Each structure stands twice: as C-alpha cells, then as structure tokens.
Image (tube, helix red, strand yellow):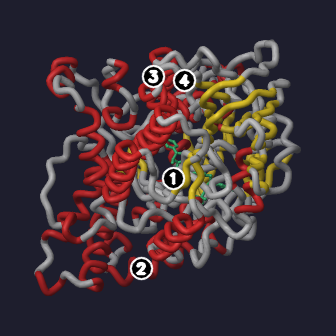
Amino acid sequence: MTIANLDSEQLRQKYAQERDKRLNAPAGRKFKRLEQPGQVADPHLPVQPREPVSDTVNFTFVGGGFSGLITSARVKEAVPNASIRILDQAGDFGGVWYWNRYPGAMCDTAAMVYMPLLEETGHMPTRKYAMGPEIHEHTRRIGRHYDLYKHALFHTAVTDVSWDADSKRWRVKTNRGDDFTTKYLAVGTGPLTVAQLPDIPGVDSFNGKAFHTSRWEYEYTGGDRFGAPLTGLADKRVAIIGTGATAIQCIPELAKYAKELLVFQRTPSAVDIRNNHDIDPEWFKGVSAEPGWQQRWLDNFTTIWGLIGGRPAEIMKKYDDLVQDGWSELALRVQSVFLSLKPEQLNPEGVMLAMEQSDDETTSRIRARVDEVVTADPVAAEGLKAWYRQLCKRPTFHDEYLQAFNRPNVKLIDTDGQGVDRITPTGVHALGKDYDVDLIIYASGFEFQNTSFTSRLGFEITGPEGTLTDAWADGMRTLHGRQTQGFPNLFLCQLSQAARFAANVPANFLESARAIAGVVKSMEENGKETIDVTKDAQDAWFNLIMSGAARAQRDECTPGYYNNEGALKIDKPSPSGISSGYPHGPVAFFQLQRDWVERGLQTGEFEGTEIA
Ligand code: NDP
C-alpha cells in the first residue's frame, strides 16, 4: 500500500507519528514576544504629537479593531448622544488589518460575512475574498460613518484602569499622559495582538534585515501593500520562517520577486482551493435589496458552521448555503456524512466514525492536490502534505501558494517537524545546516493562550474589590464571556466562554455588541449607574461552560496554537480561558444572547446581573 492510500487506522498512526516528531523537537515549541504590549513599534504611521486628555466620556473601548468598531457603532445607534472614545496602540482603526500589511494579505472568509456593517455603511466588497487594504479601508469607513474618530486616541497605550468608587466611573490612564473617566469601559484587543518570535538562540544576533510579518518594512522590500512589485528583493536571498495562514498568503508574493526564497517549514498547512473572483454589482444589488440581508447571511453562515459539533436535530436538517466559501463547504461536507448514516448508526460511536471518514476523505483530497499542483519538485510536494485532521490546525485556502514551489527560485526547507533551531549572524540554522540570507521574515504568529488576559492586554484593571489578575488567578470567570463579577460597567469582547467555536469572528462581535448596546441603552433610559454580574450567575455559567470543555480537547492533534502547542488539558479554565466555549454551539449561544437582551430591554433587568 502506498502512502497515498492509507486506510483509517494507518492514517491515525501516521498522524500520531508526525505529532510526536513535533512534540519532541529538540528546539522546543516556545515563543517570545516581539515587543511588550504598550511598547509596540509602528512602522506604518508616524506618531503625532498631541495634548493629553482629562475629560469624561460615556463609553470607552480599548482596541480599535473590529470589536471596538462594531461595539461602538451599536452603542452609537442605541444611544445617539453618547460620547464614545476608542483607544489603540496603532495609528488608526483596523486592528489586525492595520498591523498586517504583508504583501498578499487577505481574508479567506467570504467578505459578505467577514466585513461587518456592510449594509449600514453601503459598501459592496470588490471580491468574494477581500484583500487586506480593502478590509482596512472598511474599518476606517465604519469609523467615519459612526463619527468614531471624534474622540479616538491613536498611538496610545492604556497603562492603568481603576474604578473610582466615589464617582462610580472607570479612571483610565495612558502612556500619552491621558487621565480621563468613563461610565462604561469595554476591552477588545483581539486574540492576535501580541506578535511572537520563536524562542531559539541567536534571534538578536542576525546582522542582516529581519522583521515579523505584522511589521512589514516596505522601505526594505520595495513595493506596497496594494500589490506594487517588491523590487527591493530582486537581488536578495530571503528566508521565511513559518508556514501558517499568514505565510501561505505572502509566500506567493515573495516568490515572484525575491532572487531566492527559502521557506522554513516545521508543519505544513493544509491548503485547499480558494477560487476568488470579483463581485458582480448586479448580483450584489439583488442580494442586498432586502433590508436585513447581511444579518440573514451571517445567521446562515453561523448555522452551517454550527453543524460541526452542533446538536443532532440541527445536523439532520438541509440548509441553503448562501456564503459558499471554504468554511461553509467544509461544514456541509461533514454534514453530508451525517445525512448518509443509517438510524442505527446515530450513536456517539457511529457519529465519531462518520466524522473521521469525512475527515479522511477531505484531507486525502487536499494531499492529492499537492501532487497535482507541485510538479516541479516531488520532494517538496511530499513535504507540503499535511498529516493531521483538518481542524487540528487552521484550515487554509489559496490558489497560488502551492504553485509557488514550482518556481526555480523557491526552495522548501522542510525541517520534518523539528523547526529552525537557531539564528546565526549570517542566517538560519536548521537540520544541522547553515543557510546564509539577506532577510529573515518571521511568520511565526501571535501569542494566543497560556498567558494571562491582563498580561496580553498590557495593563491591569482594578475594580472595587481588587485586580482582574487576582480575580482570575484560578482561571477566567465570566457571565456569557462578557462581564465578570466585581467589575461593574466593564465589558469584555472576546470569544472564550462565549461562542468560541463559531468560525466567523466578526459575527461574535456583532452579537456581543447587540447585548452591550442593549444594556447601555436600558441603563441610560432608566437612569441607572452600575451593572455587575452576580456570583451565582457567574458560577452557573462557568459550570455550564466546563461541562462541555472536553470538546476542545485535542490531545491527538499535532501541536499548534489551537491546542496550546500540544499542552492543552482542559480540566480547569486556562488563564486566558480561551479554550472553552458555550457547549451547545454558536447558533444556540447567539439565540440565548438575543433573548437575554430582549427580555432585559423590556423589563430593565438583565438576568444574572444587579443594576443600581
Ligand atoms: P501561526 O501561529 O498559524 O503560524 C506560525 C508558524 O510559524 C507555524 O507554521 C509554525 O510551525 C511556525 N514556526 C514557529 N516556530 C518555528 C520554528 N522554530 N521553525 C520553523 N517554523 C516555526 O501564525 P500565522 O500568523 O500564520 O496565523 C495566525 C492566525 O492569524 C491564523 O491562524 C488565523 O487565525 C489568522 N489569519 C487569518 C487569515 C485569514 O485569511 N482570515 C490570514 C492570516 C492569518 P508549527 O505549525 O509547526 O507550529
């Protein structure tokens, strides 16, 4: 039997072998921060001098990415005269789309659901999958549309947040000398904010040029983020370390322009077809004619993705797939296996077998695609095949990545799970060999979990009863992932202990924004000052979340940030809480939230909270 035709059991063994190679790699799987939160260097925009502010605003959001913009937009709609301040370390709105300006940056979720507030802002995405600059410009459009630039503070890092009991306001201090108060405070700095480098010897010793993909230096490479040629690389030997979702997108661009490109791979990504195309304005006109169209698309996408790990009643229904991107197709492939099950197979073992069968088919097809595309170098083709279940690592979709390895100037340095083990003054050392290069690009990702929420935020939040770090010393505790007991008027916009498993991150932010805006509206209309969650409600939510935590256990997976580099054991919440979500899936979570806020708006009381 050839490796291409492994049966299920043999595949399982192969997956375990590949995982073990990575777990036991001598260089380890450790990372270090590129820079500390609050000390972020911005290569994109110069810092503008300004006077410190010392005023009072109604609503403050720390983070100017999608969560900050969406939440602020909904608060503005709900309470039009609210003064809203967004703070960010970046020089403009955009969050990850501000920082990640690497060539080829795009989103592989369909723009019709990934780009929020399209209906409200009247924007038509130009392509099925939007490029980074278009998404970044859209964040700025949202900022303008909702007048959010008015009080915004950019290139500003919060240094301290504390509750002032007398005024019942949060007091916010920053590294620009600001010291202001706010009635409501929301925090949403995103899961991909703290850029990281491999923690290997010699990273500081390299004498050439080096940068992280989220701090791209076009002054060195030439070109720009809009696709202008990277002329500065014509005589350069370039190394890129990492082959995750970011590298998949920028490697085709580097391949076009670098004299030589060495791709240092520890684990290959599974790269499926993307099939991007322009959006036809006539088609868009039809689709967007009826009010509420984008919410319908979002609900459809959540429903279809929710089939993965969803409830049997939902899994057995048929759905029209409006979005038809790689994610919804992936979910429907899993569903088709369920639909083919006989009634006697509808038990946990039968369902598990069906999931595995579907996974085997998909991953085998993706591996076969590598052979079809990478014809110039059979050794590289073999190295580019991913040996793990599809959802062990982030699935990727691209139509030029594998093709890049047919170019004579591109070489895959497959470290067979071991990774690059050191950086030298002249280049990269891997598998016992030195590779001298002019430029090293670290596509090594972002700190994701295993560090505390406040350490990634870069500042402490001190409530009336103490700090958030202390409150979460034994793990994150929340109600709905959004409020935490002892921190009145504070909202957390993040995915844990909420709809953690929903594929589309902006959909999560839209739902939490609906709830936050509802709470703020109700409190303002009823003349209320504070809202805090009760300990009983928080404990009950925690127990519910933990009852489903085993779902996220991925011991069998090859290591990566999805499973805390192979160290994930969910018998208690991680410091960030990041691995646990509402056990009944995103559709049920969103419905629960909508009902909760609807009842609150009618009664002025929000279950599980105390309002004064
Ligand atoms: P990742 O964490 O996914 O990838 C980091 C890469 O660096 C991995 O390939 C890792 O290998 C590799 N690496 C780390 N250390 C070493 C070493 N010592 N030697 C060799 N390789 C090493 O980061 P990304 O920036 O690629 O992606 C982060 C997330 O950003 C994505 O998962 C996604 O959620 C988001 N994103 C979304 C996009 C979209 O289209 N929506 C586009 C781009 C990013 P290994 O796998 O072995 O750990």
Q: Position of residue 462 (x, y in %)?
A: 77, 49
Residue identifier under label 1 = 495
Residue identifier under label 3 = 138
Q: Amino acid at mark 1?
A: Leu
Q: Which mark is residue 82?
A: 4
Q: Amino acid at mark 4?
A: Ala
Which quarter of the picture shows residue 49? top right
Does the rendering let one see residue 437?
Answer: yes
Q: Amino acid at mark 2?
A: Arg
Q: CA distance from mark 1 to mark 3?
A: 22 Å
| First in residue order: circle 2 vs circle 4 | 2
Q: CA distance from mark 2 to mark 4?
A: 56 Å
Q: Residues within 10 Å of mark 1 (few under 14, many from 20)?
A: many
Q: Residues within 10 Å of mark 3 (few under 14, many from 20)?
A: many
| First in residue order: circle 1 vs circle 4 | 4
Q: Nearer the viewer, mark 2 or mark 4?
A: 4
Q: Residues within 10 Å of mark 4 (few under 14, many from 20)?
A: some
Q: CA distance from mark 3 to mark 4?
A: 23 Å
Residue name at image x 45 percent, y 50 percent: 605
Q: Quadrant of the N terminus?
A: bottom left
Closer to us: 505 or 393: 505
